[in-house]
Every structure is written in C-alpha cells, then in structure tokens.
Amino acid sequence: MAAPATLPPALIEFIARFNRGEYWSSHEALEEAWRENRSGFYHGLILFASALVHFDRLNAHGVTAQFEKAERRLEAYRPSYLGLDVDRLLGHARACRDLVGAGLPQPPFHLDPQTTLIRGTEPELEGP
C-alpha cells in the first residue's frame, strides 16, 4: 500500500496547535479521534502534550508523570509513525524531564511530519 499524501485531519490539527505552543488545545484536537479509534499512538501524543502543559505550569511532578506515560505508549511506534519521528519525540521527553528537574525552561520543539515517515499501513489512516 502506498503512503497517503495526507495525514488524518485530527492529527493535522493536533500538529498545528502543538507547533503554536497550544499544548492543551492540541490535546483536545486529538482526543475525539483517540476516543473513536483507541489509537495507542494518539494516546501517547495526548500524554506528550499534557506533559508540556505541566512544563508550562512549572509542575515537575506532572511533567515527569505524563512523559513517563507518553514514553511507554510511544515506545512501540519507534522509530517513526504517521509521519512523525518518534525517536525524536522520545529524546525531547527525556530532555524535558531533566530540564524541569533542574528548573530550566523547555527548549523549542516542533513536530515536523514527513510523508517519507508514513508507512501507509497505520490503522489511523483508515478513518477516525
């Protein structure tokens, strides 16, 4: 099966909001699709965004707890999935856990989907 040219609309909206730093809103953009298809990948992204909400609130415990959950979910999708570099996501999660523990700010991070990283067999491509 050839990789599609576009990602699911809910994921596209999640990425757009996430890249604007709207972490809670990005979480909300993906939640309905996750509830419909129970995608472990979507759940991992939701937890990842939630961790960054805690980072913005300087809640070190929340950052650590949410990133640990996100990492457990996303690990199965390495090295990439649905156009996203999962290894890069996991690396950012580890870096953020270290930074928040030291009281340092979050480094800039954007999701950069690549069509070459879409397998074409991801169940999320079949619909909600």
Image (cartoon, rainbow, N blue to C red):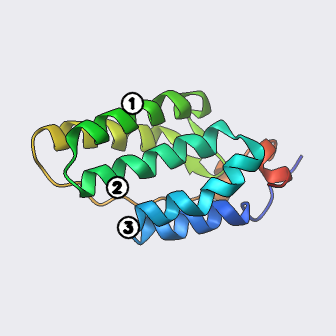
Seen in the image, is 83 located left or right of residue 23? right
Q: Is residue 57 above or below residue 74?
A: below
Q: Is residue 10 above or below residue 106?
A: below
Disc 3 element:
loop
Amino acid at pointer 2 = Val
The residue under label 3 is 21
Amino acid at pointer 3 = Gly
Tag on residue 81? none
Crowd around label 3: few <14 · some 14–19 · many ≥20 (10 Å): some
Amino acid at pointer 1 = Glu
Tag on residue 53? 2
**Proximity of marks 2 and 3: CB atoms separated by less than 8 Å:** no
Q: Say whether disc 2 or disc 3 marks the residue closer to the N-terminus.
A: 3
Residue 65: x, y in percent?
Answer: 34, 33
Residue 63: x, y in percent?
Answer: 30, 41
Instruction: Decide if residue 112 is in sight here.
Output: no
Task: Name the residue: 76% across, 45% down.
Answer: 37
Task: Name the residue: 23% across, 54% down.
Answer: 106
Quadrant of residue 6 in the image?
bottom right
* Front-lying residue, 96 or 55: 55
**Proximity of marks 1 and 3: CB atoms separated by less than 8 Å:** no
Q: Say whether disc 1 or disc 2 marks the residue closer to the N-terminus.
A: 2
Residue 62: x, y in percent?
Answer: 30, 40
The residue under label 1 is 68
Q: What is the number of callouts on the image?
A: 3
Disc 1 element:
helix
